[in-house]
Image (tube, rainbow, N blue to C red):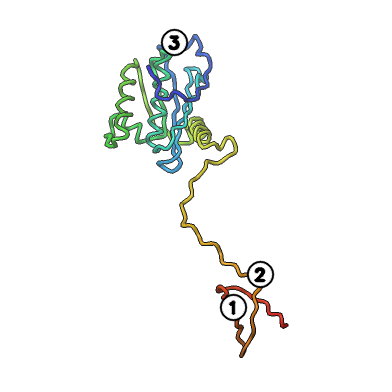
Amino acid sequence: MASLFPESRTSESRIPESTSAAQWVLAHCDGGSRGNPGPAGFGALLVDAKGQTIAELSEFLGIRTNNFAEYSGLLACLEYALKRKITRLKVVSDSELMVKQIQGKYKVNSPDLKPLWQEARNRIAQLDGFEITHALRHKNKEADALANQAMDRGMKRGGGTEPVQSLPLRAPQKPAATAPAMLRGFTKNGTIHLLGGATLPDGIFVKIIPE
C-alpha cells in the first residue's frame, strides 16, 4: 500500500513477539493547525497490550485545516497497523467531530473531509477489530506533543528560525528632498529672500549667518 505520508517521521520499537495480530493495539492520535487553515501536523503514539510503546508517528502537512490534520493522524495509524499485520486497533482522539463521523453519528458534509473519511472507512474494513473513542485533550497529551513537534519542524522553529513571512507591498516612496549645502540671500521686513530664485522645501530648518 502506498503511503499517504512518504516523508513522515516514524520512531518505532521492535514489535514484541508476544504482540500477536489477535491482540489489540492502542493508538492515541491528534492533529492540529495553527491558524485553521495554517501550518498543520499530526502525531500518534501506538502501544501494545502491555502498554509498551510500539511507534511514534508525526508529520508536517503544510497549510491545512485542523480537521484535515485530525483525519491524517487517524489514517497514519491505520496505515501503520495494516502494513505490520496488526488486525485489532483501538484509537483515541480528542476530535469529537472526527470520532462521531467515523462512528456514523455525524454526517460528513465537507467535500475536503469526505475522501479522508471514505479512505479511513476502507482501511477500517480491512481490520478484524476496530474501536474509536473520544477523549479530552489532557488525556491525549503524548499525541498532542508529537503533533506540535511536527508543526514546529515544518515551521523550522526547531532549528531556531522563524518562517519567512511575506510583507505587503508598498508604493515606492519619493526620496526626501534635501537642501543645497549653502544658499545665499538677504532679509527684508523679517522675511528671508533667496538669491537666484532658489527655494526651500517645507520643514527645512535654516541657520542665518550675517555677512
Q: Earlier in the sequence, mark 3 or mark 2?
A: 3
Q: Say which of 77 and 53 sits in front.
A: 77
Name the residue at the right extreme.
211
Name the residue at the bottom extreme.
189
Q: Earlier in the sequence, mark 3 or mark 1?
A: 3
Q: Earlier in the sequence, mark 1 or mark 2?
A: 2
Q: Up-down: is 181 above or below 9?
A: below
Residue located 40% across and 38% down the image:
66
Instruction: From the top left corner, tell me how far across and down residue 189 is, in percent.
Output: 61, 90
Name the residue at the front extreme.
196
Residue 68 in the figure: left or right of residue 156 = left
| Quarter of the image with the C terminus in it | bottom right
Q: Up-down: is 207 above or below 74?
A: below
Q: Residues within 10 Å of mark 3 (few under 14, many from 20)?
A: some
Instruction: From the top left corner, tell me how far across and down residue 22 is, in percent.
Output: 40, 12
Q: Residues within 10 Å of mark 2 (few under 14, many from 20)?
A: few
Residue type of the residue flagged with mark 2: Ala
Residue marked by disc 2:
181
Residue marked by disc 1:
196
Residue marked by disc 3:
20
Instruction: From the top left corner, tell me how far across and down residue 27 is, in percent.
Output: 44, 24
| Quarter of the image with the N terminus in it | top left
Numbered tag placed on residue 4 in the rendering: none
Residue 125 in the figure: left or right of residue 93 = left
Residue type of the residue flagged with mark 3: Ser
Q: Describe the element under mark 2 as helix, strand or loop.
A: loop
